[in-house]
Image (cartoon, rainbow, N blue to C red):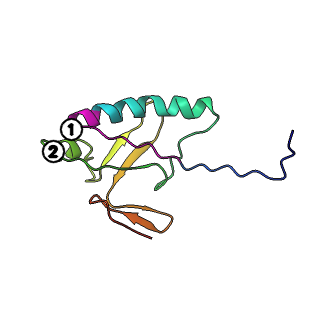
Amino acid sequence: EVPIMGATFVDDHTVVLITRSPSVMLRAIAVVLRILPATFKKFRMGLDESPGKTEAFLVLRGKNATHARESFRQPDGKLKTHVPESNCMLSVLQPYKHLGSITRADGTSTA
């Protein structure tokens, strides 16, 4: 037994999906978005619904990539999708910014 002097809970989480085509990616995203809220809830966590907190960095390549990306387009022009069983709208961003670091679709990043 080891006494714990202090503990830190890290609440950032990343889910990486790599697929062979945009159509398979859309199906994979739907599966993850369907199970993510229940999984978080099981561990007494939740999706942060505040602006800029729950986001997706989406890179689609190949045939019909533009069509697949546009399936996230909302009437206000932004790319988002609803997370089932939550009030959360997942923002689709590019480039992705986190803690001062910027990641772009071509794989480059800056710190």
What range of the chain is rendered magenta?
13-26
Relative height, residue 80 to residue 96 (above, below) = above
Circle 1 is placed at which residue position?
21
Mark 2 and mark 1 residues within 8 Å of each other at the beta carbon: yes
Q: In the shown orientation, is residue 44 left or right of residue 109?
A: right
Q: Secondary structure at mark 1?
A: loop
Residue 92 spot, x, y in % from top left: 34, 50
For the stretch drawn in magenta, the main secondary structure is: loop
Residue at 53 percent of width and 29 percent of height: 38
Circle 2 is placed at which residue position?
62
Task: Please tell me which residue lies in front, 86 or 110.
Answer: 110
Disc 1 residue type (three-letter): Ser
Disc 2 residue type (three-letter): Gly
Q: Residues within 10 Å of mark 2 (few under 14, many from 20)?
A: few
Q: In the shown orientation, is residue 5 left or right of residue 67?
A: right
Residue at 44 percent of width and 42 percent of height: 15
Residue 14 spot, x, y in % from top left: 47, 46
